Image (spheres, helix red, strand yellow):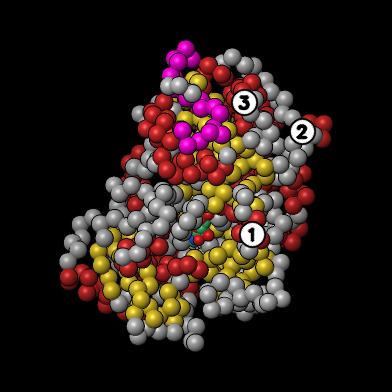
């Protein structure tokens, strides 16, 4: 079969987007990573570990100690660790000393309740200060923190609490009443429910306790018990395509990777005001929305409100954000309104912008350079990897559309694929690494980095099946160019096989999004008796464009000019594409709807605006 593909580089070269955004001559403080090759050659994880303190007296490694207690005991005690904006814009600040005290109270509260080592503590909270005290206090107590996204409905909440064996849950009175009370009877292991925002003397619903009643009754000092770096620390559920969500297990050792990768891929350092727009309910919002900025002694900015263009620009300006980590969907929503709203703001504090979660089309990278004064640095990772694995670095030229290069300490490879689209594993358990540039394969990583997941909860078979021939198999298809930059093609599940061609939806979407009328596109393979599959695109328009037949034809012709035989044969307009709550276009859902098939697990589906 002819495995011709839409070549990432060719797509970029033929666009209005620059093939490379050069960093040569960029002013400002030197980046953390200035010489990629040299840093890579010299890097070792044990050196990275040595940048952290470890628990006093050699008693192990605990994420919360590295994130707060070590700063609270030193010159950074009075630095603002956490600055939370509530929906109305009111600001609550906690210094490192205060965050150490609040998290110590929560750890003592858990101890008083009899919740111990390895037991699971869930949160179901908006982005309020108590969420951060809960996360860090749980880690101090050597219990396991598992954050739930507050917009989940009762069933997904029940399922995750059940799978994770939740012993304690921290939530709010409103969320409890609407989402937890209806399922409480199904959760016999859930011994304690703490309500944030309830007055300490409020008896509340049966089976709940006010958060403040327990945290105010205990001391603001807590000595972290010995913690084995391999102790389970974080439990993140990833959205399965169908069937049940999987619980990815992470350990305290992960903090070594959180710290090192934030330095390299986010250029993060002490003194930064860092805004990660992801909710801690997703792995990004925990690894980089809680842990990494605190290990660096930065100020972590948290906004309780959801996306709103004017508010986000105001926040970037007024809070003097220096490093901003966000998602392609949000950037595309900002881009819909051009460069004007950004240029009207003083964004001079902004030093570095990065994006993760799904493919970043080149247009956005270039728009960032024009509108924000900073190009957007794409990086790639997943729940299982726990930290950024591939990225565009501050001092490195960006190739818009590329995810960048593997981080120091990370060895990536592309593996030859079999008929099912995934890496071809021989009966003897061997795989073949693709050496030539330009060919697509399953993206694989050499195991052994500190934040690699240590298992899927209660599913060792599935964990074992994620590895072959000495590699961790990511389930993503990618390509590498001659300079070692990686280009995302598709999730293996999303790849389209059309008339002998392999089509990555992202590359088609990316081309469509270059048309001035197109705000966003989602592309799927639609079964076809002759071609196997044809490419079908769902398109959302920018404001001011009408979804009429003339525009539809124009887009089909535009696609054909740019993509020839790989162009979408069918294009339909959609006012809203389905997204996960973490911002990914749900191509699987577009396909299920197209084919009239069951929608599968939609617990992570964003509500339609
Ligand atoms: P999750 O585990 O939910 O965080 O999703 C991880 C998946 O998101 C990856 O396996 C990719 O398919 C996708 N993803 C994350 N970052 C990127 C990126 N920079 N470019 C393309 N896809 C990405």
Q: Which of marks 2 and 1 is in front?
A: 1
Judge whether 381 appears above or below 475 on screen.
above
Locate residue 434: give its quadrant.
bottom right
Disc 3 from disc 2: Cα separation: 17 Å
Q: Give the range drawn in magenta.
A: 185-204
Q: 138 or 277, which is in the foreground?
A: 138
Query: Count the marks: how many?
Result: 3
| 516 sits to left or right of 22 | left
* Residue 48 visible, this orientation: yes
Among numbered discs 3 and 2, the one appearing first in the sequence: 3
Q: Is residue 14 magenta?
A: no
Judge whether 395 appears above or below 97 on screen.
below
Which residue is painted at 49% across and 20% down in the image?
210
Locate residue 202: give its quadrant.
top left
Q: Which residue is the extreme one toward the right?
A: 57
Circle 2 SS class: loop
Q: 429 or 483, which is in the foreground?
A: 429
Residue occupied by mark 1: 461
Judge whether 14 appears above or below 408 on screen.
below
Q: 572 or 346, which is in the foreground?
A: 572
| 484 sits to left or right of 187 | right
Which residue is painted at 43% across and 78% down in the image?
497
Q: Are marks 2 and 1 in contact (CB under 8 Å)?
A: no
Residue occupied by mark 2: 226
The location of residue 331, given as percent across then percent down, is: 40, 52
Residue occupied by mark 3: 110
């Amino acid at each position: 079969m002819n495995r011709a593909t839409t070549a990432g580089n060719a797509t970029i070269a033929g666009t209005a987007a620059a093939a490379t955004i050069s960093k040569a001559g960029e002013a400002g403080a030197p980046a953390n990573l200035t010489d990629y090759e040299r840093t890579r050659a010299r890097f070792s994880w044990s050196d990275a570990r040595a940048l952290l303190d470890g628990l006093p007296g050699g008693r192990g490694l605990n994420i919360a100690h590295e994130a707060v207690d070590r700063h609270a005991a030193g010159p950074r005690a009075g630095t603002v660790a956490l600055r939370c904006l509530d929906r109305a814009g009111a600001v609550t600040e906690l210094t490192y000393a205060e965050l150490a005290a609040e998290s110590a109270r929560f750890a003592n509260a858990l101890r008083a309740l009899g919740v111990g080592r390895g037991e699971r503590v869930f949160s179901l909270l908006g982005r309020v200060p108590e969420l951060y005290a809960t996360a860090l206090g749980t880690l101090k107590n050597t219990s396991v923190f598992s954050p739930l996204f507050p917009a989940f409905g009762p069933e997904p909440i029940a399922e995750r609490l059940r799978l994770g064996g939740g012993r304690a849950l921290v939530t709010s009175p409103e969320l409890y009443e609407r989402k937890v009370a209806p399922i409480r009877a199904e959760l016999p292991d859930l011994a304690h429910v703490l309500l944030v925002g309830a007055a300490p003397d409020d008896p509340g619903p049966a089976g709940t306790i006010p958060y403040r009643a327990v945290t105010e009754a205990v001391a603001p000092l807590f000595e972290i018990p010995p913690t084995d770096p391999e102790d389970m620390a974080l439990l993140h559920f990833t959205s399965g395509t169908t069937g049940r969500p999987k619980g990815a297990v992470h350990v305290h050792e992960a903090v070594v990777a959180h710290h090192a990768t934030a330095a390299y891929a986010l250029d993060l350092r002490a003194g930064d005001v860092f805004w990660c727009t992801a909710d801690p309910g997703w792995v990004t919002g925990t690894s980089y929305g809680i842990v990494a900025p605190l290990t660096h002694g930065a100020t972590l900015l948290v906004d309780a409100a959801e996306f709103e263009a004017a508010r986000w620009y105001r926040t970037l300006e007024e809070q003097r954000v220096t490093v901003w980590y966000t998602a392609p969907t949000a950037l595309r929503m900002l881009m819909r309104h051009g460069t004007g709203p950004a240029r009207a703001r003083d964004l001079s504090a902004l030093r570095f912008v990065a994006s993760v979660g799904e493919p970043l089309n080149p247009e956005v990278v270039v728009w960032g350079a024009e509108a924000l004064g900073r190009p957007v640095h794409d990086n790639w990772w997943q729940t299982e990897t726990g930290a950024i694995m591939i990225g565009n670095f501050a001092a490195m030229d960006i190739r818009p559309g590329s995810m960048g290069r593997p981080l120091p300490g990370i060895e990536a490879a592309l593996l030859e694929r079999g008929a099912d689209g995934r890496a071809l594993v021989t009966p003897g358990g061997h795989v073949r690494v693709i050496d030539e540039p330009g060919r697509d394969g399953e993206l694989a990583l050499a195991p052994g980095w500190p934040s690699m997941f240590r298992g899927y909860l209660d599913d060792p078979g599935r964990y074992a099946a994620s590895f072959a021939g000495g590699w961790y198999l990511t389930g993503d298809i990618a390509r590498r160019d001659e300079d070692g930059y990686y280009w995302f093609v598709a999730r293996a599940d999303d790849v389209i096989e059309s008339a002998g061609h392999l089509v990555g939806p992202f590359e088609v979407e990316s081309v469509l999004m270059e048309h001035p009328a197109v705000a966003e596109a989602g592309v799927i393979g639609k079964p076809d008796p002759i071609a196997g599959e044809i490419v079908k695109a769902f398109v959302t328009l920018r404001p001011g464009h009408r979804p009429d037949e003339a525009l539809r034809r124009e887009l089909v012709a535009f696609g054909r000019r740019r993509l020839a035989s790989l162009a979408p044969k069918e294009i339909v307009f959609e006012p809203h594409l389905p997204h996960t709550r973490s911002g990914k276009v749900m191509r699987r859902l577009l396909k299920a709807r197209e084919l009239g098939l069951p929608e599968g697990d939609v617990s992570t589906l964003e509500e339609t605006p």
